[in-house]
Image: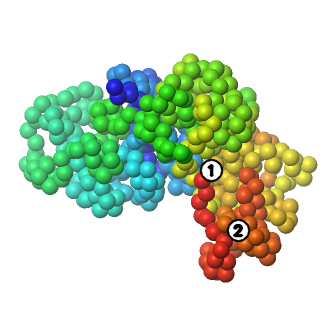
Amino acid sequence: MTSPRRTFAIISHPDAGKTTLTEKLLYFGGAIHLAGEVKARGANRRARSDWMKIEQQRGISVTSSVMTFEHAGITFNLLDTPGHEDFSEDTYRTLTAVDSAIMVIDAAKGIEPQTRKLFEVCRLRSVPIITFVNKVDREGRPVFELLDEIADMLALDVCPMTWPVGMGGTFQGILNLATRQITRPEGDSRTFQGKVEADPALPDDVAEEIELAEAGYAAFDAAAYRHGDLTPVYFGSALKDFGPADLIAALADYAPPPRPQPAEPAPVSPDEKEVTGFVFKVQANMDPQHRDRIAFMRLCSGTFRRGMKLTPTGHGKPIAVHSPILFFAQNREVADEAFPGDIIGIPNHGTLRVGDTLSERADIRFTGLPNFAPEILRRVALKDPTKTKQLRKALDDMAEEGVTQVFYPEIGSNWVIGVVGQLQLDVLLSRLDAEYKVAAALEPAPFDTARWVSAENPADLKDFTDVNRAAMAKDRDGNPVFLAKSAWEVGYIQDRYPKVRFAATRER
């Protein structure tokens, strides 16, 4: 029997309409009753997934959160990924916890750099992708041009499942190519209000396009889609309610149920009896009234029951999970049980970390959750030197969440933080101030990038670290890190020390 669970993420470039689509999926799935316009102000805007202060000010998603809704007997777990160009590693790691993804593309802009970056992460794990071309109610690029761009840039077979009848000013609805039914816009707002026509008369140019498309593109093949080789393409406008219902149906019909997860000593199948899962995200202070830390765990096998004892890799002491949380749109509920594919929140006080495997037996470890070498390094300068202890705790907490990485230099007392994108620096300062009451400034660091160093022979590593002590630091796990002034220096040093390995990513 296949599982009635679908765990998916939405990936897109900023402004392609991801937050609107997320909201409409929750609305069509019956999880929220009013799809408040995303541009609404005040109380209406606070809902959904954007809870952090900086997100509410900028109207963007910075952290990944999870929303669960049920529709037609299927439980959907939607993981929200930051779509902002300076999103953090958090996004990459969230994509390790999903079984499929919806890729949102703006009809006027096509594939943008961020979409491409996120797509590559999905490809590493052969995550199947459904493509949604959004905003066809506005002027956009020709349909064939968009389809060919997806096929060429992402090296995927494309299969159009719906087709826009006109775009922008000439938009007359969306045709379902399988059923030959068209959904029509109505009223002054030109939204979809339920009007569906069977076998409509189509404008000649559109009929001709459809005939060409059906002859020229691959037919839908569920196995090729699940393998990550083919993407079904849907057209629509999330804002005007064209598309969300098609996407929910596509996820229900085609998207894979929970898949086996890569692990050592062997991959873990969802059918296994023992409960296993991995922590892909840790979020502190979601509730400002309580200094809470929640570890988000993707359940990979077994039936989880409240109060169960699970052993985290790392320190091997079993922990009893008394109040696990399920996230239903705006509400949290305590989970009495959960099944493979579900995401549960585990409140804890720093015992659980990103990358931890939790299981009933201690000899298993999930693999493939990466740490990336930071592209921006800064020194942290405290404005009030008496708050050193609070600063260290704050930086450690945020390094655990994946907001930043923290490096403690061997020489000198100024800690160095590393991030993948500029926005994370703003998030860091905003949260230091709001959540930890620590006033700090960021100063330029004399370094440009970092590499984790290791060697088969400990003596080789010691020789290297002794000579380069001024550029050496430890990360928060105590691993040695080489801080380089430039990418050129990394190459130069690598050539000089062939026995030392320099890694730009490290498994957590």
Residue 330 lies left or right of residue 356; in this view the side is left
Q: Earlier in the sequence, mark 2 or mark 1?
A: 2
| x, y percent for residue 473 | 77, 63
Q: Secondary structure at mark 2?
A: loop
Q: Nearer the viewer, mark 2 or mark 1?
A: 2
Q: 71 above or below 55?
A: above
* Image quarter in which the N terminus is found: top left
Q: Which residue is mark 2?
A: 457
Instruction: Say which amino acid is labelled 1.
Output: Arg
Q: 359 above or below 391?
A: above
Residue 229 lies left or right of residue 360; in this view the side is left
Q: Any mark on residue 508, and which?
A: 1
**Residue drawn where x is 29% and y is 62% of the image:** 152
| x, y percent for residue 236 | 29, 41
Q: Secondary structure at mark 1?
A: loop
Q: How is the image coloured?
A: rainbow
* Rendered image quadrant of residue 43: top right
**Residue drawn where x is 58% and y is 43% of the image:** 365
Q: Give the Cα separation between the discs numbered 2 and 1.
A: 22 Å
Residue 233 visible, this angle: no
Of residues 342 and 200, the one drawn nearer to the viewer in this rendering: 342
